[in-house]
Image (cartoon, rainbow, N blue to C red):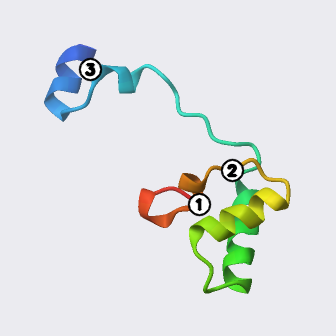
Amino acid sequence: MDVSERRACRALGQHRSTQRKVPRGRDDEAALTADLVALAETYGRYGYRKISALLKAAGWLVNDKRVDPSTGSG
Protein backbone atom coordinates (compact mmCIF):
# COMPACT_ATOMS: atom_id res chain seq x y z
CA MET A 1 0.00 0.00 0.00
CA ASP A 2 1.20 3.46 -0.79
CA VAL A 3 -0.37 5.25 2.15
CA SER A 4 1.73 7.25 4.55
CA GLU A 5 1.78 6.42 8.24
CA ARG A 6 0.41 9.85 9.03
CA ARG A 7 -2.54 9.51 6.68
CA ALA A 8 -3.34 5.93 7.74
CA CYS A 9 -3.29 6.85 11.44
CA ARG A 10 -5.47 9.88 10.83
CA ALA A 11 -7.99 7.72 8.92
CA LEU A 12 -8.09 5.14 11.73
CA GLY A 13 -8.17 7.72 14.50
CA GLN A 14 -4.98 6.42 16.12
CA HIS A 15 -2.05 8.38 17.41
CA ARG A 16 1.09 7.86 15.35
CA SER A 17 3.18 6.93 18.40
CA THR A 18 1.10 3.75 18.81
CA GLN A 19 2.67 2.42 15.62
CA ARG A 20 6.29 2.85 16.68
CA LYS A 21 6.76 0.43 19.57
CA VAL A 22 6.05 -3.27 19.39
CA PRO A 23 4.16 -4.39 22.51
CA ARG A 24 6.16 -6.78 24.63
CA GLY A 25 4.54 -9.56 26.57
CA ARG A 26 5.94 -11.30 29.61
CA ASP A 27 7.80 -14.57 29.20
CA ASP A 28 5.94 -16.04 32.14
CA GLU A 29 2.47 -14.80 31.16
CA ALA A 30 0.93 -18.29 31.05
CA ALA A 31 2.26 -19.20 34.51
CA LEU A 32 1.04 -15.91 36.00
CA THR A 33 -2.41 -16.38 34.49
CA ALA A 34 -2.58 -19.96 35.76
CA ASP A 35 -1.65 -18.88 39.29
CA LEU A 36 -4.14 -16.02 39.18
CA VAL A 37 -6.96 -18.29 38.03
CA ALA A 38 -6.08 -20.92 40.65
CA LEU A 39 -6.17 -18.33 43.43
CA ALA A 40 -9.43 -16.87 42.14
CA GLU A 41 -11.02 -20.33 42.07
CA THR A 42 -9.75 -21.19 45.56
CA TYR A 43 -10.70 -17.84 47.09
CA GLY A 44 -13.75 -16.91 45.05
CA ARG A 45 -14.92 -14.13 47.34
CA TYR A 46 -11.58 -12.30 47.43
CA GLY A 47 -11.27 -9.13 45.42
CA TYR A 48 -8.49 -8.18 43.05
CA ARG A 49 -6.49 -6.43 45.78
CA LYS A 50 -6.39 -9.51 47.99
CA ILE A 51 -5.59 -11.80 45.03
CA SER A 52 -2.74 -9.50 43.98
CA ALA A 53 -1.45 -9.53 47.58
CA LEU A 54 -1.47 -13.34 47.50
CA LEU A 55 0.39 -13.29 44.16
CA LYS A 56 2.98 -10.92 45.64
CA ALA A 57 3.35 -13.19 48.67
CA ALA A 58 3.96 -16.08 46.28
CA GLY A 59 6.82 -14.14 44.69
CA TRP A 60 5.18 -12.57 41.65
CA LEU A 61 6.01 -8.98 40.74
CA VAL A 62 2.54 -7.84 39.76
CA ASN A 63 0.66 -4.56 39.95
CA ASP A 64 -2.88 -4.40 41.37
CA LYS A 65 -4.11 -2.88 38.11
CA ARG A 66 -2.88 -5.94 36.21
CA VAL A 67 -5.09 -8.21 38.32
CA ASP A 68 -8.14 -5.91 38.31
CA PRO A 69 -10.67 -7.19 35.72
CA SER A 70 -12.21 -3.75 35.20
CA THR A 71 -8.97 -2.41 33.67
CA GLY A 72 -9.10 -4.87 30.81
CA SER A 73 -5.90 -6.73 31.65
CA GLY A 74 -5.13 -9.79 33.74
Q: Position of residue 58 (x, y in %)?
A: 85, 61
Label 1, residues with CA under 10 Å away: few <14, some 14-19, many ≥20: many
Of labels 1 and 2, earlier in sequence is 2
Q: Secondary structure at mark 2?
A: loop
Q: Position of residue 39 (x, y in %)?
A: 73, 75
Disc 1 marks which amino acid? Val
Viewer-nearest residue: 12 or 68: 68
Q: Is residue 5 visible?
A: yes
Using the rendered view, name the quadrant where residue 56 is placed: bottom right
Q: Secondary structure at mark 3?
A: loop
Is residue 18 positioned above or below 56 on the image? Answer: above
Q: Is residue 2 visible?
A: no
Viewer-nearest residue: 4 or 60: 60
State which mark lies toward you, 1 or 3: 1
Is residue 52 positioned above or below 61 on the image? Answer: below
The label on residue 59 is none
Q: CA distance from mark 1 to mark 3?
A: 40 Å
- Mark 3 — residue? 1
Q: CA distance from mark 1 to mark 2?
A: 8 Å
- Mark 2 — residue? 62
Q: Residue at x 42, y 64 (%)?
A: 70
- Mark 1 — residue? 67
Q: Residue at x 49, y 65 (%)?
A: 69
Q: Position of residue 3 (x, y in %)?
A: 21, 17
Is residue 25 positioned above or below 29 on the image? Answer: above
Disc 3 marks which amino acid? Met
